[in-house]
Image (spheres, grey):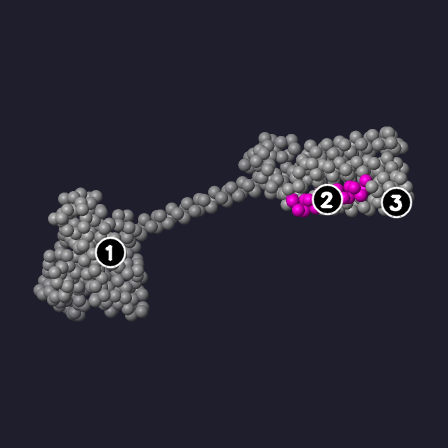
């Protein structure tokens, strides 16, 4: 656009846009300014013509010439006020050709008539014609051809009135003619320059708006892209829940809140039973569907404040704020029952979908999630060893000064909630298998 502004093909010889749509848009943008300018000009013209009535009376006295001039001046004043009122009520009239040109023609005709009726006041006639010529260019919003036509009528009428109906000296007529020609050239160059500058500014304004609009669109696209990237960085693509990194970010916030407020925080480890066999038998596509279905079940039984994430593979991890072991066990059992009641036609009647859940609580004095998560993990493994499809509760570890860091002395009181019995039963002889760590497989 900036390159086109300085090129000749953007504007025509009238200093207007060659594109009609562009020119129409520009005219709409300055319509209010043109209407205000035209009302002011018409008001000033009406006032001047009324003032000239007094001058006519002083110079001509009361007679036929004065009466004729008075009639024409009053008609001109009325015409100016009518057009001004029309422009005030409807600003679009300011850019209409007919009403503006009719008023201009009437004003110029009255001025030429003054030369015939007051032939002895040459200086006043020449000055008024020069002012009228400049006013056509500067104050009346119109197209350049009509400005030139109005000034041509003014010059032709001046020559006719001077040579035929008045006693103006030939030298004064020639000087006045040259002055009017100079004024017309100056007015033409001035109005062309002004119109060109206005349209260049308008084109720059359109370019700036277009650039701002593109920038806003790019900013919006970047924001959407950042939101998608942020979502991808925080969300597991398969299940739609929080990934491992984002889960620990949210769980750490809940841990800090629990330590600050002195409220309980429980953790659950959820594992899909026999997932590897199911994946090998039915394919990875069905395995992905099972993981997404289990994630949906988890979300359906959890509270709004709970945090769910995919820990890895077929394992899910849940943080339960404001939940002690009893509340966490109830939620975990509800989750286990919901998954057990699922029926997937593609699995068949012989294959059931179940999960094993390990539950633990963050104890007082623990500033990290790792110990509680390790206890929930060990409880999950114990549930796998006891037949799967159950909720296993890890109680508080007994303190032991001789126990190494990260391996609390488990007091053989790990609780289980089997599928057939909702009561909590004590599990014995767990210290030995738990002390040696977790084996790699859990299916």
Q: x, y (%) of residue 65?
A: 88, 39
Q: Work out which quarter of the rendered image holds the N terminus and state it.
A: top right
Residue under label 2, please give it: 82
Earlier residue among tags 2 and 3: 3
Is there any visible trace of residue 116 in the rendered image? yes
Q: Position of residue 224 (x, y in %)?
A: 39, 47
Q: Residue at x 75, y 42 (%)?
A: 79
Q: Residue at x 75, y 31 (%)?
A: 152
Disc 1 vs disc 3: which is toward the camera? 3
Q: Position of residue 433 (x, y in %)?
A: 10, 60
- Residue linked to disc 1: 298
Q: CA distance from mark 2 to mark 3?
A: 25 Å
Asked if disc 2 and disc 3 are in contact, CB closer than 8 Å, the reply is: no
> CA separation, marks 2 and 1?
79 Å
Q: Relative to 18, is 128 on the left or the right?
A: right
Cα distance, mark 1 to mark 3? 102 Å
Q: Residue at x 18, y 45 (%)?
A: 346
Q: Which residue is mark 3?
A: 57
Marks 2,1: beta carbons within 8 A: no
Q: Nearer the viewer, residue 365 or 5?
A: 5
Q: Secondary structure at mark 2?
A: helix
Point out the tag, 1 or 3, that comes first from the N-terminus.
3
Residue name at image x 53 percent, y 43 percent: 209
Q: Residues within 10 Å of mark 2 (few under 14, many from 20)?
A: some
Q: Is residue 338 magenta?
A: no
Q: Secondary structure at mark 3?
A: helix
Q: Is residue 334 above or below residue 66?
A: below
The span shown in magenta is 72-91
Callout 1: SS: helix
Q: In the current view of this chain or complex, which residue is farthest to the left?
A: 429
Residue 11 falls in which quadrant of the image?
A: top right
Q: Give the main secondary structure, helix, strand or loop, of the magenta stretch.
A: helix
């Amino acid at each position: 656009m900036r390159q086109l502004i300085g090129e000749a093909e953007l504007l025509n010889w009238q200093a207007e846009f060659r594109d009609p749509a562009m020119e129409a848009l520009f005219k709409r943008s300055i319509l209010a300014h043109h209407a205000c300018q035209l009302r002011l000009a018409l008001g000033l013209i009406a006032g001047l013509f009324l003032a000239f009535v007094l001058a006519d009376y002083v110079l001509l006295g009361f007679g036929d010439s004065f009466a004729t001039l008075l009639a024409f001046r009053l008609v001109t004043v009325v015409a100016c006020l009518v057009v001004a009122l029309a422009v005030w009520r409807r600003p679009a009239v300011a850019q209409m050709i007919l009403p503006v040109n009719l008023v201009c023609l009437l004003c110029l005709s009255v001025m030429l008539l003054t030369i015939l009726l007051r032939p002895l006041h040459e200086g006043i006639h020449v000055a008024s014609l020069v002012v009228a010529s400049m006013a056509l260019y500067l104050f009346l919003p119109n197209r350049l051809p009509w400005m030139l036509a109005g000034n041509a009528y003014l010059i032709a009428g001046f020559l006719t009135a001077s040579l035929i109906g008045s006693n103006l000296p030939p030298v004064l007529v020639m000087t006045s003619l040259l002055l009017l020609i100079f004024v017309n050239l100056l007015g033409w160059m001035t109005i062309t320059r002004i119109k060109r500058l206005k349209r260049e500014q308008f084109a720059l304004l359109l370019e700036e708006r277009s650039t701002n609009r593109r920038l806003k669109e790019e900013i919006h696209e970047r924001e959407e892209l950042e939101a998608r990237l942020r979502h991808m960085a925080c969300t597991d693509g398969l299940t739609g829940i929080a990934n491992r990194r984002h889960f620990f970010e949210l769980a750490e916030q809940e841990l800090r809140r629990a330590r600050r407020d002195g409220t309980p925080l429980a953790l659950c480890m959820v594992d899909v039973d026999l997932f590897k066999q199911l994946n090998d038998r039915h394919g990875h596509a069905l395995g992905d569907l099972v993981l997404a279905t289990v994630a949906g079940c988890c979300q359906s039984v959890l509270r709004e404040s709970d945090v769910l994430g995919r820990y890895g593979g077929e394992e899910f991890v849940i943080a339960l704020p404001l939940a002690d072991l009893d509340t966490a066990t109830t939620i975990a059992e509800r989750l286990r029952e919901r998954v057990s009641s699922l029926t997937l036609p593609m699995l068949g009647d012989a294959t059931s979908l179940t999960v094993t859940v390990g539950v633990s609580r963050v104890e007082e004095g623990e500033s990290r999630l790792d110990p509680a998560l390790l206890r929930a993990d060990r409880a999950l493994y114990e549930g796998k060893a006891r037949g799967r499809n159950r909720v296993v509760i890890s109680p508080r570890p007994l303190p032991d000064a001789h126990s190494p860091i990260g391996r609390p002395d488990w007091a053989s009181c790990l609780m289980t909630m089997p599928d057939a019995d909702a009561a909590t039963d004590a599990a014995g002889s767990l210290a030995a298998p738990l002390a040696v760590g977790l084996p790699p497989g859990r299916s």
